[in-house]
Image (tube, rainbow, N blue to C red):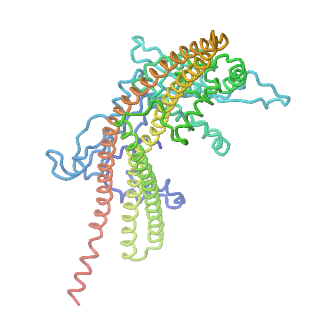
Amino acid sequence: MMSSAPPSEPATAGGDDDMESLPLAAASDYASVASTFDPLLSSTSATAASPRSPPTRAAAFTLSPTFSSSFVDPPSYADATGGGAGSSSPRSASSPSSASPRSARLAASEYSLLAVSDPETEAEPAATSLVPGSAPTYVSYLVTSVHRRDPDQRRHSVRRRFRDFVTLADRLAEAFRGHFVPPRPDKNTVESQVMQRDEFVAQRRAALERYLWRLAEHPAIGPSDELRVFLQAEGKMPLPGSTDMASRMLDGAARLPRQLIAGEDAVAAPQEVVQPARGGRDLLRIFKELKQSVVTDWAGVKPPLLEEDREFLEKKYKLQEWEQQLTSASQQAEALVKAQQDMAETMGALGLAFVRLTKFETEEAMYDSQRIRAADSRRVATAAVKASRACRDLNAQTVKYLDTLHEHLSIMLSVHTAFSDRASALLTVQTLMSDVASLQSRIEKLEAASSKIFGGDRARTRKVEELRETIRATEEAKFCALREYERIKENNRSELQRLDSERKQDFLVMLKGFVASQAAYAEKIVDGWETVAEETSGYARARGSDSITS
């Protein structure tokens, strides 16, 4: 959910005078009517933040009775609730608060500029088609970056397609196991077929840019070589074999007969055990780990190594509960946004109805009472349209602040992936430890059988030596796998601490901003209707005099 800051709305008086010049004949569209007759709606719009600069929070509005709403910084909760020092009214003033935690993290990132722009349609280089003009095409994007530590502040611009972003995500997943790696945007094949092409490309461009900023603000991924190469390396991104699923599955299928029959590469190499087995290059390892998982989960056999970090298990359980509550809150936030949007549209339709009523009363006026009713209808129409615009602006603020719920809900995907890396690394260690125990058992049986033969059995002795060599290789692989498991555990620990700290900061800013914006716009709407009530208070005085006379 993306939002932009509402335009600045200078306080004006004389909304009734503007009503006289309203082109009522062209009042078929609410937006055109509102922009013409509401001085607040016809004010100059604030310049939107550039997509090529770090996304910053829109500024807070100064809460004043004159409807001023210049956006400078997120409002503080004290100002919204009347706790601000020196404030004469609960919501009469606000002072700039500190910058948002997200802005601070972006300011501390390795890059001062990241932009995804200029989408272009290109033909596949090796595409051949019998029908002219029907060759497969793809969309490439111009990725521009400026490294913050570069003394010359040079701009690097490279062309990247969506497949390159997928490659980057795969590389980061391998290099940063156990970290909460921000998830890349989905391919959305169905949406690309349903939506208009330009709209889909625009949404994907924005999503890819947000993805790069999330990577840049990550303390481990931001300064990484993987991200730097993606942003600065000229030419097309190569797809290495380690991330090509099809080639990995073919390699694994070709190796499996040699592993089963000839015993070739029966033990995973140390550089392979530090990556998950599900990649497909070693099918024998996949089968072994699947067997270990079934024996542990279904047969109830205690594995040689258990997850004994109780603090981690407790946090994992609490995060699962947190995700459920976060999902519920996110759904309610979407319902609130829709309700406020409906309120804005309904209030706008009411204002338009009173505009038409004013037109009728003005054109047909023959008596002073009709002209009075026309003036009153004009006041109600003005207040209704102002209230409609305030509801729309409030909705934009609601989206901006409550979008934190959706952001942290998307982070949970990264959390699950990091925990899955930990479980996969633990399973690899368990499988290798079980292999060592199985090999040692086989050696004991062979030695026992060989001892019963006078002079020994050379074949069994040779087999025992081979098994001992296999044990040495397996122990080496187990040592590497255990070291990788400990590294992932440490990454999980540090990431959980970072998530907890960022969550506290982000939600504090979210709650402060949400409360203050709700209070400010509620006051704004009430002030508008109070003005109408004062202007029409003559009815109450007239009714009072009539009752006294009677």
The part of the image, by quadrant, that contains residue 462 is: top right
Q: Picture coordinates of residue 511 (x, y %)? A: 31, 47
Residue 335 is left or right of residue 95, and the answer is right
Residue nearest the viewer, comparing 434 with 532: 434
Residue nearest the viewer, comparing 371 with 472: 472
Residue visible at 51% across and 38% down? 301
Residue visible at 31% across and 56% down? 522
Q: Is residue 85 above or below residue 363?
A: above
Q: Picture coordinates of residue 364 (x, y %)? A: 47, 73
Residue nearest the viewer, comparing 96 with 549: 96
**Direction right: furthest residue:** 130
Number of numbered tags placed on the structure image: 0
The part of the image, by quadrant, that contains residue 256 is: top right
The part of the image, by quadrant, that contains residue 499 is: top left
Residue nearest the viewer, comparing 264 with 326: 264
Q: Picture coordinates of residue 516 (x, y %)? A: 29, 49
Q: Picture coordinates of residue 510 (x, y %)? A: 34, 44
**Direction left: furthest residue:** 86
Residue 455 is left or right of residue 549, and the answer is right
In this rendering, does residue 181 appear at all? Answer: no
**Direction front: furthest residue:** 454
Quick one: quadrant of the C terminus?
Answer: bottom left
In this rendering, does residue 222 appear at all? Answer: yes
